Amino acid sequence: MASPDPQRLSLNTATVRKQWNLAQAIEGCARHGIRGISPWRDQVKELGLNQAKKMIQNQGLAVTGLCRGGFFTAQHWLDDNRRAIEEAHELQAQCLVLVVGGLSEGSKDLPAARERVTDSISRLLPEARKARVPLAIEPLHPMQAADRACVNTLEQALDICESLGDGIGVAVDVYHVWWDPKLEAQIRRAGAGRILAYHISDWRVPTRDTLNDRAMMGDGVIDLRLIRSWVEAAGYAGFHEVEIFSELDWWKRDPDEVLRTCKERHLRSS
Ligand code: ZN
């Protein structure tokens, strides 16, 4: 299979968040010829929405997503998600990524949590459509079902999408879904219309931390070429967003080295 187009590489700023603020990440992308960026809202807030928008536009970067909305168990979820939609609109983000939240405090009722997610998104969706901000449900690995996201497979996410109609799709993050025996079929089911973002990293063996121990592409066990072939066969022609949370390794390195490695591994190993 051919190497991916280097122009399709995007940087999720979490990858260098311990080393760089958003302004530095934007400049870093420009310096390294990376054409897409996916910022986190706390970083946007720190830099200022207008300044973030201006800097991103000046460098001509595509905003491949805004991270993130969701957490529908949180107390002020509606106001917070409304703000997230406004910010995504201002930044012309290709989608607002939703990490949907887990169980309510003290609850063991997973089906109820999942129902609440669908209800919450159905309340939010009309506003997102009006702002022309597609919502991207990101299914997370089941080890995070309790505390971060009770939507854990692409199949679950697509069921929600289909029950709600237009303006909603999925973020396919290989780290969360690589193990799923239904992955190929569900990517095909999603098609280009529902795949709003494609996130890449790798699965380290052993995994030392359930949140912050992702590997660089090529350093783990995920067949990234195979999954990309499925995503492309489904018609997805968007960016490949590198998203690596790595307390013990990549967050400790020189961020320019991290970006150089992302570019090289994107070509060679994804
Ligand atoms: Zn992701």
Image (spheres, rainbow, N blue to C red):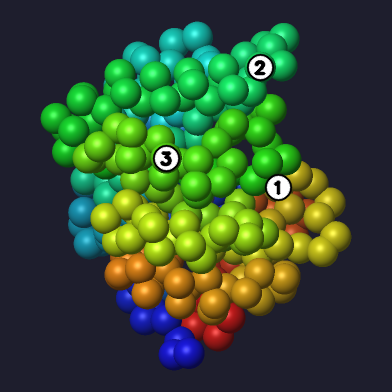
**Type of residue at label 1?**
Asn
| First-in-chain label (1 vs 3) | 3
**Proximity of marks 3 and 2: CB atoms separated by less than 8 Å:** no
Residue at 44% in and 90% down: 2
- What residue is shown at x 68% (from left), y 37% (from top)? 144
User: Which quarter of the figure is the C terminus placed in?
Assistant: bottom right
Q: Nearer the viewer, residue 251 or 36?
A: 36
- Quick one: SS at disc 2? loop
In what element is the residue under mark 1? loop
Q: Which residue is mark 2?
A: 109
**x and y percent of residue 78 in the render?**
37, 15
In this figure, which residue is indicated by the disc labeled 3? Answer: 159
Residue on which the image places disc 1: 212
Q: Is residue 174 visible?
A: yes
Callout 3 amino acid: Asp
Q: Nearer the viewer, residue 76 or 146?
A: 146
* Separation of residues labelled 1 and 3 (CA atoms): 29 Å
Residue 98 x/y as whole percent: 44, 36
Residue 241 horizontal side relative to residue 58, left or right: right
Vertical arrangement, residue 66 with respect to residue 198, above or below: above
Query: What element does badge 3 sit on?
Result: helix
Marked residue nearer the N-terminal end (3 or 2): 2
Query: Crowding near pointer 3: few (<14 within 10 Å), some, many (20+)?
Result: few
What percent of the width, then of the height, locates residue 235?
A: 30, 69
Q: Which label lies toward us, 2 or 1?
A: 2
The residue shown at (42%, 25%) is: 118
Q: Residue at x 21, y 57 (%)?
A: 58
Mark 1 Cα-neighbour bin, 10 Å: few <14, some 14–19, many ≥20 = some
Kindly give the residue lying farthest to the bottom in the view shown: 2
Q: Quadrant of residue 79?
A: top left
Give how far across and how far down residue 150 sits, in percent. Answer: 59, 31
Q: Is residue 270 left or right of residue 205?
A: left
